[in-house]
Each structure stands twice: as structure tokens, then as C-alpha cells.
């Protein structure tokens, strides 16, 4: 295969795919820096988009950035590179979370690359009830295998464990709504008309479960004027738990890569997803979320999977405002 050119068009494709990744509250806590002399695209954390109340340790920020790195890897393979990813490549620059080297053309094209790249543009978080049949066991097994390939573990718990996890998530959600600081922070990340494309659009806010079984995050911060009418959610939700062996920043990044890989493969199978992150945000609840019968592990995300409409994309910041180029390429070219 001939060499791939890292020009302005390729750069726009790469960063455009990366920023389509999910992030907590759609905070988009990433920025990109190209070093043309080494054909390296660096991914940095944007500290001012961190959520100090909801995510004081930065776990969710790292997971979000890891998801963007996975999209970047898929886009690089789609363009013909064999990208090499280094996580936390420079201890002297703590905001530099990943570096993606783009100096080698791919020798072969992976069969899944085209499907995964296409799924980037159709993956949207769904906060409404799921409809349709249960997710097939074969699809769930594929998602488990995908997570394992990213050095993480995805478990599909049984009904009793699902009830326990939903109860923990509900307890965390009640604690959030009782916390004035978290309520204020949550409300601040609701997009207002005419504002920047950060946060959750009001049109994307989900209803609450009329039966009270499924704890959907209440972005309206318990203001009755902003509440959507409640809806009937699925009686037996399909839940998946993503865990890592340890709980370091590098593990959070790996969890982000795994999360997005799982979400893209689910999208290929037309399976939708929403993230129940409330329990993960409180350290003591997060510890309780681990299933002790499965040995050690650190829960990084709880997912809800099912069938439903594709949903609408959430607005993103423009690509040109998300990247710096040290020299050699004009991103506006």
C-alpha cells in the first residue's frame, strides 16, 4: 500500500472522527496538537472543561478522552495508516493524555474498519426507553470480546445483579439531586439556545422512568419547569459493566478506548446505548458496584443496551478550533 499523506483533509477527517466520541455531559474535554515533524497527533485534556463536583479525580474526563482516541485510531486505519497509540507519553506534561503516531501505512485493511468508521457517525447516546427484542447473546458475546481486546472486562450481569446495580445507581442519583453543588453543575451543562455547542441540548434530555425502576440522570436538576413527561421504560433492562484491573489514569484511558469500541460494535448491530454513570462518580458507591464474586476489579462504566431509534447527534465544537499545528500544515487550507 502506498504511503498516506497527512494533509489538511486527512487531519480534518481524523479530528472530526475523534470529536464525535461521547463525553461526560458532552463536555468535550479534549484538544489536539499535531507535530508534523514526527507525524504525531497528540490528545490533550482541557482542564477548564473538567467537572469539579461530578468528576473531581478526572476519571470521567480520562474515559471521555480515551473514547476520542479510539475514534481517532479507527479513522487513521480507515485512511490507510497503522497507528501506534501511546497513553500518558510524557510525565512532564500531565495534560498530554495520548499520542498517536501516523508514520506507518497499514499493510492490510482490517475487515471491521469500514463498519466501525461508519458507526462513528451513527452512534448517539439514547436517554429514552428501548423497544424491541432482547439483545442477542451472540452480540453481547462480541461486545465482551471487544472489551477484552482493549485490556478491560465487560460483564453482562444476571437479573439479581442488575437489580442491585440499578438500586446503587438510583441511590447515587438521589444523592446528586440533594447536592446543591452538583445540581448547579449539572444545570450549567444544559445547552442554551445561541450558546456554544457544549453540554446537553434540551431536546436530548431524557424522561424519567414512570415505574421508577431505571434511574435516568436528571439534568434538569429537579426544577419542575424543565421536567419532561415520564415514560415507561423496559421492564428488564440489559446492563453491561465495564471494569479494569486497576484504577489509575492509564486504566481510565483504556476504559475509554474499550467503551467506545463496544459502542461502535453495538452500533454496527443497531444496538443503542446509554450510560448510567452516577454510581461511578461517588467512590464509595463505585466500590460497591463491583461484583465481589468475580474477583478484583474497578468499575469504570455501567451501560444500558437495547433497541430503539438512532437518535440525533449532539452538537460539537468545530474541528478547526480543536487543534493546534506546530508547523507545516494549515488546518484551514
Image (cartoon, helix red, strand yellow):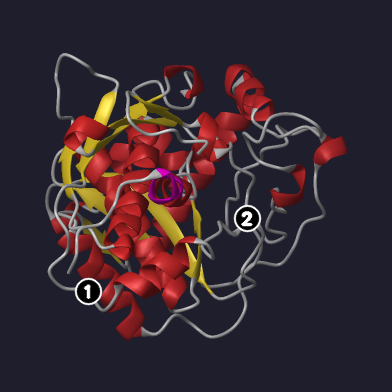
Can residue 15 be seen by looking at this rendering?
yes
Nearest to the eye among marks 2 and 1: give it. 1
Examine the structure image and report whether residue 328 is included in the region drawn in magenta: no
Disc 2 crowd rating (10 Å Cα; few below 14, some 14-19, many 20+) is: few
Q: Position of residue 179 (x, y in %)?
A: 59, 22
Out of 115 and 188, give the one closest to the viewer. Answer: 115
- Determine which quarter of the picture holds residue 41: top left
Q: Which mark is residue 110?
A: 1
Examine the structure image and report whether residue 9 is included in the region drawn in magenta: yes
Extreme-right residue of the structure: 225
How far is the residue under mark 2 from the one under mark 1?
Answer: 27 Å
Q: Secondary structure at mark 2?
A: loop
Q: Position of residue 15 (x, y in %)?
A: 42, 44
Residue wearing tag 2: 313
Out of 196 and 305, give the one closest to the viewer. Answer: 196
Can residue 238 be seen by looking at this rendering?
no
Out of 30 and 326, give the one closest to the viewer. Answer: 326
Q: Overall secondary structure of the magenta stretch? A: helix
Determine the residue positioned at 40% across, 20% down: 56
Boundaries of the magenta span? 8-12
Q: Position of residue 188 (x, y in %)?
A: 67, 25
Q: Are marks 2 and 1 in contact (CB under 8 Å)?
A: no
Determine the residue positioned at 81% across, 34% down: 193
Determine the residue positioned at 19% across, 56% down: 150
Out of 56 and 8, give the one closest to the viewer. Answer: 8
Amino acid at each position: 500500500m502506498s504511503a498516506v499523506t497527512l494533509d489538511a483533509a486527512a487531519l480534518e477527517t481524523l479530528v472530526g472522527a475523534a470529536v464525535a466520541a461521547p463525553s461526560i455531559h458532552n463536555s468535550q474535554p479534549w484538544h489536539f496538537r499535531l507535530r508534523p515533524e514526527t507525524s504525531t497527533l497528540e490528545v490533550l485534556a482541557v482542564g477548564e472543561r473538567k467537572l469539579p463536583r461530578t468528576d473531581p479525580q478526572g476519571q470521567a474526563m480520562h474515559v471521555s478522552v480515551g473514547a476520542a482516541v479510539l475514534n481517532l485510531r479507527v479513522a487513521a486505519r480507515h485512511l490507510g495508516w497503522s497507528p501506534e497509540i501511546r497513553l500518558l507519553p510524557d510525565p512532564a506534561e500531565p495534560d498530554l493524555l495520548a499520542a498517536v503516531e501516523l508514520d506507518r501505512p497499514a499493510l492490510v485493511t482490517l475487515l471491521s474498519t469500514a463498519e466501525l468508521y461508519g458507526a462513528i457517525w451513527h452512534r448517539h447516546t439514547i436517554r429514552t426507553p428501548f423497544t424491541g427484542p432482547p439483545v442477542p447473546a451472540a452480540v453481547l458475546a462480541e461486545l465482551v470480546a471487544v472489551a477484552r481486546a482493549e485490556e478491560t472486562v465487560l460483564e453482562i450481569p444476571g437479573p439479581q445483579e442488575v437489580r442491585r446495580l440499578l438500586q446503587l445507581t438510583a441511590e447515587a442519583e438521589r444523592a446528586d439531586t440533594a447536592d446543591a453543588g452538583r445540581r448547579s453543575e449539572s444545570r450549567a451543562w444544559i445547552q442554551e439556545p445561541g450558546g456554544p455547542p457544549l453540554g446537553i441540548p434540551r431536546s436530548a434530555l431524557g424522561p424519567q422512568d414512570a415505574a421508577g425502576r431505571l434511574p435516568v440522570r436528571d439534568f434538569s436538576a429537579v426544577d419542575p419547569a424543565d421536567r419532561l413527561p415520564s415514560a415507561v421504560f423496559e421492564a428488564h433492562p440489559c446492563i453491561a459493566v465495564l471494569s479494569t484491573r486497576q484504577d489509575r489514569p492509564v486504566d481510565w484511558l483504556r476504559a475509554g478506548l474499550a467503551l467506545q469500541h463496544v459502542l461502535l460494535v453495538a452500533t454496527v448491530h443497531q444496538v443503542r446505548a446509554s450510560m448510567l454513570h452516577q454510581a461511578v462518580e461517588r467512590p464509595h458507591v463505585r466500590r460497591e458496584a463491583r461484583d465481589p464474586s468475580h474477583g478484583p476489579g474497578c468499575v469504570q462504566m455501567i451501560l444500558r443496551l437495547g433497541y430503539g431509534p438512532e437518535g440525533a447527534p449532539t452538537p460539537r465544537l468545530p474541528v478547526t478550533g480543536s487543534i493546534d499545528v506546530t508547523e507545516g500544515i494549515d488546518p484551514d487550507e
